[in-house]
Image (cartoon, grey):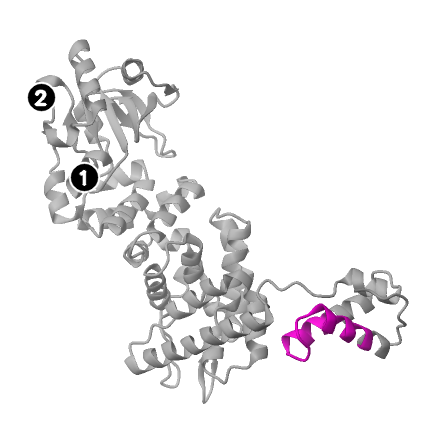
Amino acid sequence: MKEHLQHHIFKVISQLAGQQNVQAYAIGGFVRDLFLKRPSKDIDVVVIGNGITFAEAVAKKLNVQVSVFKNFGTAMLKYHDLEVEFVGARRESYRRDSRKPIVEDGTLEDDQNRRDFTINALALSLHPDNFGELLDPFGGISHLKQKLIKTPLNPVETFSDDPLRMMRAIRFATQLSFKIDDTAIEAIKTNTDRIKIISQERITDELNKIILSLKPSIGFNYLFDTGLLHKIFPQMVALYGVEYRDGKGHKDNFYHTLQVLDNICETTTDLWLRWAAILHDIAKPPTKRFEPGHGWTFHGHEDKGARMVPKIFAQLKLPLNDKMKFVQKMVQLHLRPIVLSQSIVTDSAVRRLLFEAGDDIDSLMQLCKADVTTKNEYKVKKYRQNFELVQQKLKDVEERDSIRNWQPPVTGTDIMEIFGLKEGREVGIIKNQIREAILEGEIPNTREAALQFTIEKGTQIGLKVVAQTK
């Protein structure tokens, strides 16, 4: 492994470890990623002794600053493109009501025992006497080859001590396309209630990392099958299942949602567009109705879903800002391009979609394409052709009418000046009439045409022109 430790910082650490007769090891994710051939800029160094003192000596040698976190017993320095954290070897014990351990000084064995997974317990010696020697007490290398997530010690205790590790196990399995060991799966199932002692922010952070993976459905299937999803996101679990009546069923909206999520991950890394894929059908359970002679319907699920988005974001401690509003807009509008693609596309319908979607129209089209999950190749081909027609129509109408992020060519202030009005109902009526006339194509989207239209409509409701405006 010496060839992987050629960076100057390892030579400095090794030299100081020899001079001070201190055992120091690169450990955890950096070592794991070496074997996975994944680039890593974060290095954890465990020191048998005082990690902070040793870090300060390394920083002095490199002539860089060191940040000390005494509460955690850690120190961190940045050197070129690397971020290196030092900590003294520790042993940990846990109380039932907290994931915060009682920490004591320990040996390397103690430190490896406390690691979450065997693939994260790999250590490389940095002492000059055995520089580059691999210490792998739990068969982590074998598990990397097997693509297996396994805990160093009894998984029931591992997950009970720190329940966040259940989310981390699923996250690593998703990111790496690994399988979780069967005994670990059973341990997660028996510890799902323990997740309640973890802060929502930490749970959501792991959930977002799953969503940002190449194929998030791997993680969501694990979350569902273990029962964790039922604890952290029950609204999504409600999508599961198929109900039959009079021989008629509907698709399983849980697995449909996972397919839409995987589909959209092929075209975007945008976390919030991926969240839109997760939530696009979230209101199907509460809007589900059976109509005799017709079958199952979910009328209005896009409207109710959009209203559910703020509550879900608040529940999951996701940002209640423009990110949430973007997801809400995507959920609200996700059926519109599909409806357009199934009928004769009128200019007015396209203008309305451009008006409501604004700069997010391209994201909306991505979501709608991902929403096509039929296995019928003929239907897929037909949908794609229709979507291409809709996109061309969107482009043509936008180039001609400039409706995207539309601003009214005649403002409320203009209307008040023309008719000598104060703010009131008449101003609102005329503003709405101008917008509808432009969207319906009755008048062009120009100030001249809108001013003339304003005077006509104002006169019709008994208003008199008192000033001219340009």
- Residue shown at the point (37%, 73%) measured from the top left: 372
Residue 446 colored magenta?
yes
Tag of residue 130: 2
Q: Secondary structure at mark 2?
A: helix
Quadrant location of the N terminus in the rendered image: top left
Compared with 313, 8 (above or below) is: above
Tell me if mark 2 has few (under 14), some (14-19) or many (20+) residues whose alpha carbon lies within 10 angstroms of its own.
few
395 or 206, which lies in front? 395
Question: Label 1 sits on what residue type?
Answer: Ile
Residue 254 quadrant: bottom left
Tag of residue 119: 1
Tell me if mark 1 has few (under 14), some (14-19) or many (20+) residues whose alpha carbon lies within 10 angstroms of its own.
many
Q: Is residue 58 visible?
A: yes
User: x%, y% of residue 167?
Assistant: 32, 46
Tag of residue 5: none
Compared with 148, 225 (above or below) is: below
What's drawn in magenta, residue-wise? Answer: 432-456
Quadrant location of the C terminus in the rendered image: bottom right
